[in-house]
Amino acid sequence: MKKTGYKPIIKYNNGSGAILCNKCRIIIKSNLTKDEFNGKTQLLFCSKCGKEELENHINNYGRSKKK
């Protein structure tokens, strides 16, 4: 897993656990497996925020700097 500076946000959801989007905090997955509950997941963003995060990353770091 590539380091992004983000960690999965895991909350209890009636005992089953849930992963929240790092940006808008909506539930992106519930009924977690044991590994997911222990933070072993790549789910960090919902589809909308993930797309925005990717676009921001490309705009900020993906282009070659002109000399």
Image (cartoon, rainbow, N blue to C red):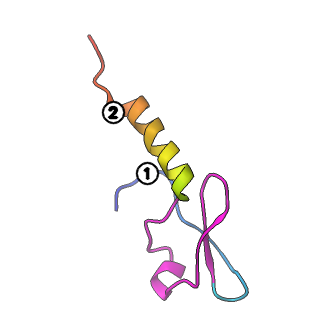
* Residue under label 2: 62
Give the residue displayed 70% in from the left and 81% down from the top. 13
Q: Main secondary structure of the magenta part?
A: loop
Q: Can you say whether 22 is above or below 28 in the image? A: above
> In the rendering, at what x and y percent does residue 39 appear?
50, 73
- Mark 2 or mark 1, which is nearer the start of the sequence? 1
Left/right of residue 22 with respect to residue 41 in the rendered view: right
* Residue under label 1: 4
Q: Secondary structure at mark 1?
A: loop
Per the rendered image, the range of residues in magenta is: 17-44
Q: Nearer the viewer, residue 21 or 8?
A: 21
> In the rendering, at what x and y percent does residue 52 appear?
52, 43
Left/right of residue 21 with respect to residue 42 in the rendered view: right
Q: Look at label 2 and name its amino acid.
A: Gly
Q: Nearer the viewer, residue 59 or 36?
A: 59
> In the rendering, at what x and y percent does residue 3 appear?
39, 54
Which numbered disc, 1 or 2, marks the residue closer to the eye? 2
